[in-house]
Image (cartoon, helix red, strand yellow):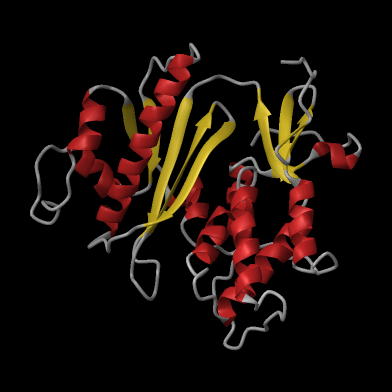
């Protein structure tokens, strides 16, 4: 083993040390993806998703090749290591790798154009308190074809984003409460693992971890031991058990302030920009010659 000094680059992830924080990004890796797609000179956009797809979307001759579509989409999954703002878009594209259609090629090209305008973006690792908090959300029946829900959650250690997930459910939820509750169950499982991991690093969570959800019925279901007629098919013991043991604490939050909303659906540009800042995704301060400094939001 050798002492190589401070880390600057690890498996394509750039790590910059600043006075009060570290900044991790993958600008070189993102640039290589644009080169593969011949989009190094494309016009950037400010939103990676589309709330409404055009009737006849323009296609790209190179991205229309299914093998290239699969290769670039697969490579984009690695880019989400430091770019949680594109996690939903990559999840949507990955669902159609077996048979990409014209609209999927259009969505891929728009995502790459968004990456073009945010090449130097990443996430900071700040020196703050080491208290866990998490946000959970779900888009009920968001898939217009299968009517399956998409859930997403993210966890912060202090002000630093450390975990995030976007997943399409394998079954159709019968209500928005059911889809939200399943998302809470997945987040609870992830939180218990994070708590044990932090305990191994001598960072025990002495207080219950705050979990924020914008569905009051899902919160009531987790806290109420009675199976109601409309929810008797939902198993609630898992979350309630950890609530009773004071491992977690469910708290309501307004939909406007729900950070995890960015993982569940396509958003308008103002809404997307606001939630992206809540995720702490920002431009690398070093690209601005030290003029810009990271400010916690």
Q: Position of residue 217 (x, y in %)?
A: 25, 48
Residue found at the very far right of the displayed protein: 289
Q: Position of residue 49 (x, y in %)?
A: 59, 66
Q: Which corner quadrant of the image does residue 244 belong to? A: top left
Q: Is residue 154 left or right of residue 273?
A: left
Residue found at the very far top of the displayed protein: 202
Q: Is residue 137 above or below residue 289?
A: below
User: Which one is nearer the viewer's eye here, 277 or 281?
Assistant: 281
Q: Which corner quadrant of the image does residue 63 belong to? A: bottom right
Q: Which corner quadrant of the image does residue 246 belong to? A: top left
Q: Residue at x 61, y 43 (%)?
A: 81
Q: Residue at x 50, y 42 (%)?
A: 164
Locate the N terminus by quadrant: top right
Asked if residue 266 shows in the view, the reply is no
Q: Residue at x 56, y 59 (%)?
A: 90
Q: Residue at x 25, y 61 (%)?
A: 175
Q: Position of residue 5 (x, y in %)?
A: 80, 18
Q: Is residue 207 above or below residue 137?
A: above
User: Which one is nearer the viewer's eye here, 182 or 14?
Assistant: 14
Q: Is residue 99 above or below residue 194?
A: below
Q: Is residue 288 left or right of residue 94?
A: right
Q: Position of residue 228 (x, y in %)?
A: 10, 50
Residue found at the very far front of the displayed protein: 1
Q: Is residue 3 above or below residue 169?
A: above
User: Which one is nearer the viewer's eye here, 75 or 185?
Assistant: 75
User: Which one is nearer the viewer's eye here, 117 or 258?
Assistant: 117
Asked if residue 89 shows in the view, the reply is yes
């Amino acid at each position: 083993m050798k002492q190589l000094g401070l880390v600057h680059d690890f498996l394509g992830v750039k790590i910059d040390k600043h006075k009060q924080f570290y900044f991790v990004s993958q600008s070189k890796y993102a640039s290589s993806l644009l080169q593969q797609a011949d989009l190094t000179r494309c016009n950037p956009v400010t939103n990676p998703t589309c709330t409404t797809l055009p009737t006849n979307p323009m296609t790209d001759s190179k991205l229309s090749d299914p093998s290239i579509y699969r290769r670039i989409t697969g490579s984009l999954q690695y880019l989400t290591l430091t770019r949680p703002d594109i996690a939903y878009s990559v999840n949507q594209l990955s669902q159609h790798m077996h048979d990409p259609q014209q609209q999927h090629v259009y969505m891929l090209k728009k995502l790459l154009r968004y990456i073009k305008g945010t090449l130097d973006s990443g996430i900071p690792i700040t020196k703050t308190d080491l208290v866990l908090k998490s946000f959970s959300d779900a888009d009920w029946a968001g898939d217009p074809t299968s009517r399956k829900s998409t859930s997403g959650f993210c966890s912060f250690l202090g002000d630093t984003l450390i975990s995030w997930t976007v997943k399409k459910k394998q079954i159709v939820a019968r209500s928005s409460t059911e889809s939200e509750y399943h998302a809470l169950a997945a987040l609870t499982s992830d939180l218990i693992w994070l708590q044990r991991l932090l305990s191994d690093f001598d960072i025990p969570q002495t207080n219950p971890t705050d979990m924020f959800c914008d569905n009051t019925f899902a919160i009531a279901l987790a806290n109420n031991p009675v199976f109601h007629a409309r929810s008797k098919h939902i198993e609630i013991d898992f979350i309630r058990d950890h609530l009773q043991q004071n491992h977690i604490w469910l708290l309501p939050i307004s939909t406007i302030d729900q950070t995890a909303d960015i993982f569940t659906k396509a958003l308008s540009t103002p809404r997307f920009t606001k939630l992206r800042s809540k995720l702490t995704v920002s431009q690398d301060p070093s690209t601005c010659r030290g003029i810009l400094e990271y400010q916690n939001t």
